[in-house]
């Protein structure tokens, strides 16, 4: 499928998805959300793709939020449908077998912050600005911001950010646990690709297991979460990759994982 509002480039098992509406700082309208959702579904089926990087076109923004111009005309019913589309897209990313690395090149506001929170690893350029400024527009986040933010940074910090609409810089975002690492702007994609390459060389069985164990485990009580771990751990022992990984260690060579 060809896309109008996003672009996808694939190399070495890494798919780099760019939101491509730089004139409006990569704001998410309905069409872009549908395209990104479709792209995640398609990449999921592509056996050669092992990791995804999500970033924004240009040097100003990752995503400056949901499209305010489109939202300004929405009825209550349309707003519901729009929020549902956004949630659906973010669940697709969160539940994808592919680890998603968000590379934050500039503004990640509103839907941009909500999108990075659905990803698995977040790398920010030094000049990134992150926040949930919806309150300044007389609304609150509609793509999971009131829910994922407190789960990530704790409820006090989340409420402060949601109630004031204050944007924070990359360093503060890292301090509160919203960003894994901060790098020079011109090293952002290079760093994301380096990490993606490292993950792509692992067993894709295990990257999928680890991602889903952490995500699902966080939503249930600890004993149930540990049962999930026992189940995946034991089923790992019927994979090629477990046998290869341990054999390679004992033979003092690099493992050749096949994702089976
Ligand atoms: N939706 C629609 N258009 C947006 C947008 C959004 N979320 N964010 C930026 N744009 C558009 C602007 O309207 C402007 O369009 P124009 O050139 O036709 O006037 C263009 O992108 C450039 O933005 P501009 O505001 O001129 O850039 P800036 O550098 O002065 O400011 C921001 C950058 C990000 C601080 C500012 O654009 C902003 O506050 N955006 C909205 C952020 C937000 O509230 N997001 C949550 C939405 S729920």
Image: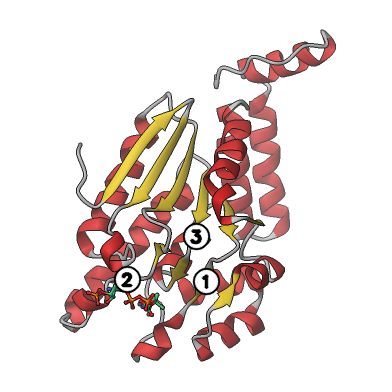
Spatial separation of the CA atoms under disc 2 and disc 1: 14 Å
x, y percent for residue 44: 39, 36
How much space separates mark 2 and mark 3, taking CA atoms?
A: 13 Å
Residue 52 showing in the rendered view = yes
Tell which circle, 3 or 1, labels the residue nearer the N-terminal end. Answer: 3
Give the mark, 2 or 1, whose residue is nearer the N terminus.
2
For the question of whether residue 238 can be seen, the reply is no
Q: SS of the residue at dot 3?
A: helix
Crowding at dot 2, Cα within 10 Å, few <14 / some 14-19 / many 20+, comes out as many
Ligand 1 is found in which quarter of the picture?
Answer: bottom left
> What residue would you read off at disc 3?
116
In depth, the one of 107 and 77 nearer the eye is 107
- What is the basis of the colouring in this image? secondary structure
In the image, 137 versus 238, the foreground residue is: 137
Looking at the image, residue 229 lies above or below residue 224: above
Q: Which residue is mark 1?
A: 130
In front: mark 3 or mark 1?
1
Secondary-structure class at tag 2: loop
Mark carried by residue 66: 2
């Amino acid at each position: 499928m060809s896309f109008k509002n996003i672009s996808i480039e694939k190399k070495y098992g890494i798919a780099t998805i760019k939101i491509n509406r730089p004139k409006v700082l990569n704001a998410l309208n309905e069409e872009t959300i549908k395209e990104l959702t479709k792209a995640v579904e398609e990449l999921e089926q592509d056996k050669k793709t092992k990791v995804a990087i999500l970033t924004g076109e240009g040097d100003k923004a990752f995503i400056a939020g949901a499209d305010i111009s489109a939202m300004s005309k929405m009825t209550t019913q349309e707003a519901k449908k729009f929020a549902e589309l956004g949630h659906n897209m973010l669940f697709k990313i969160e539940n994808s077998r592919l680890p998603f690395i968000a590379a934050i090149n500039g503004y990640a506001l509103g839907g941009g912050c909500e999108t990075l929170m659905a990803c698995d690893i977040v790398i920010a350029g030094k000049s990134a600005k992150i926040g949930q400024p919806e309150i300044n527009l007389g609304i609150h986040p509609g793509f999971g911001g009131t829910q994922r933010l407190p789960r990530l940074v704790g409820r006090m910090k989340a409420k402060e950010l949601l109630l004031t609409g204050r944007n924070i810089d990359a360093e503060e975002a890292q301090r509160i646990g919203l960003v894994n690492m901060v790098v020079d702007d011109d090293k952002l994609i290079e760093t994301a690709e380096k990490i993606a390459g490292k993950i792509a060389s692992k067993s894709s069985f295990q990257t999928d297991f680890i991602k889903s164990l952490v995500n699902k485990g966080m939503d249930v009580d600890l004993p149930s979460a540990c049962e999930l771990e026992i189940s995946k751990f034991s089923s790992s022992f019927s994979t090629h990759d477990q046998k290869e990984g341990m054999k390679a260690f004992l033979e003092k060579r690099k493992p050749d994982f096949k994702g089976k």
